[in-house]
Image: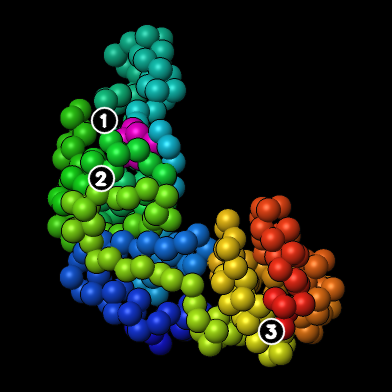
């Protein structure tokens, strides 16, 4: 599994590779927690590529309800059909306006329908911690049965469940009942060696010296008391920015010019500057 992930330029440690393997073989959702930017969402994208499957993404947010995640009626088409019926009478060919043809499938229904049809998609439920607890309770039922009932239409059940990846930045705790249905894994910031390898895979235009310097600088930054420590995504952005500026090494001046690529809060920038950029660059 590690080699398969690496073939998609995703550098995973053994524990993550084992968790992914178990989730796939046991047909269980994979629940990934960790700080923002450590590569949780990327796991689902890589799995979709490896399995040659469709990636269906549900981005969670506060106020997300079942109708936006599951299905809703295409009211505009229904109204048009009603008007056609009124204008053409019984000769108008519009079909049953409460049938599947007039239903808009949202990510959860799409995933179940695709799996029921024998096409096993990858369903990414991203940043579940942003959604309300009421939605989480519904999701618990769905992940148990992979069955969706549309009262006016039919019940759709996937005998073989889709590949499900659930991510959380842990801004709030997810209920134990949902976690128990999943294979759980915490994705931490990479160590120095793995971050260098990630840079070599994802930012091949960065020189070997620059990759080593960036990885070391990131390790130092994360040890500081920052409001939002930078993740791997910021490491890659930093490498891209420096390459665009023609930098083959990380200097104090280059770090100062590009610090906003890595840190997103003024308080963190001031804290790093007070600490000393030369100590971060090394």
Q: Nearer the viewer, mark 2 or mark 3?
A: 3
Q: Is residue 148 left or right of residue 266?
A: left
Q: Residue 243 occupies which quadrant of the picture?
A: bottom right
Say which residue appears at 15% left-offset and 57% top-offset. 159
Q: Secondary structure at mark 2?
A: helix
- Does residue 142 sit above or below 27 in this rendering? above
Determine if residue 187 is in view: yes
The disc label shown at residue 139, or none: 2
Expressed as whole percent of the image width and height from the top left, the position of residue 160 reads 18, 61
The disc label shown at residue 71, or none: none
Which comes before the other along the chain, label 2 or label 3? 2
Report the magenta residues as a range. Answer: 64-70
Q: Nearer the viewer, mark 2 or mark 1?
A: 2
Number of numbered discs on residues: 3
Q: Nearer the viewer, mark 3 or mark 1?
A: 3
The disc label shown at residue 99, or none: 1
Q: Residue 15 occupies which quadrant of the picture?
A: bottom left
Q: What residue is pinned by disc 3? A: 213
| Dot 2 and dot 3 residues touching (CB under 8 Å) | no
CA separation in Å, label 3 and label 1:
60 Å
Q: Is residue 23 left or right of residue 75?
A: left
CA separation in Å, label 2 and label 3:
43 Å
Q: Of residues 25 and 49, which is closer to you in this image?
A: 25
Say which residue appears at 32% left-offset and 68% top-offset. 185
Q: Of residues 273 and 78, which is closer to you in this image?
A: 273
Q: Quadrant of the N terminus?
A: bottom left
Q: Is residue 192 left or right of residue 25?
A: right
Q: Secondary structure at mark 3?
A: helix
């Amino acid at each position: 599994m590690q080699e398969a992930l690496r073939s998609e330029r995703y550098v995973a440690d053994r524990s993550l590779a084992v968790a992914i393997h178990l989730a796939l073989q046991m047909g269980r959702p994979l629940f990934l927690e960790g700080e923002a930017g450590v590569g949780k969402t990327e796991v689902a994208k890589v799995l979709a590529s490896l399995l040659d499957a469709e990636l269906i993404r549900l981005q969670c947010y506060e106020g997300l309800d079942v109708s936006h995640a599951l299905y809703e009626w295409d009211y505009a088409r229904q109204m048009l059909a009603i008007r056609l019926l009124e204008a053409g009478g019984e000769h108008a060919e519009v079909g049953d306006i409460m049938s599947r043809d007039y239903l808009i499938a949202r990510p959860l229904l799409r995933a179940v329908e695709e799996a029921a049809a024998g096409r096993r998609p990858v369903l990414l439920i991203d940043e579940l911690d942003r959604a309300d607890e009421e939605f989480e309770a519904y999701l618990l039922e769905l992940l148990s049965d992979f069955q969706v009932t549309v009262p006016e239409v039919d019940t759709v059940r996937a005998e073989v469940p889709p590949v499900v990846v659930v991510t959380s930045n842990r801004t709030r705790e997810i209920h134990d009942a949902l976690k128990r249905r999943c294979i759980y894994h915490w994705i931490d910031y990479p160590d120095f060696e793995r971050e260098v390898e990630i840079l070599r895979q994802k930012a091949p235009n960065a020189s070997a010296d620059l990759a080593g310097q960036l990885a070391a600088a990131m390790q130092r930054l994360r040890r500081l008391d920052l409001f939002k420590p930078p993740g791997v995504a910021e490491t890659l952005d930093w490498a891209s920015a420096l390459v665009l500026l023609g930098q083959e090494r990380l200097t104090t001046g280059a770090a100062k010019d590009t610090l906003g690529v890595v840190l997103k809060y003024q308080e963190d920038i001031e804290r790093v500057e007070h600490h000393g950029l030369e100590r971060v660059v090394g």
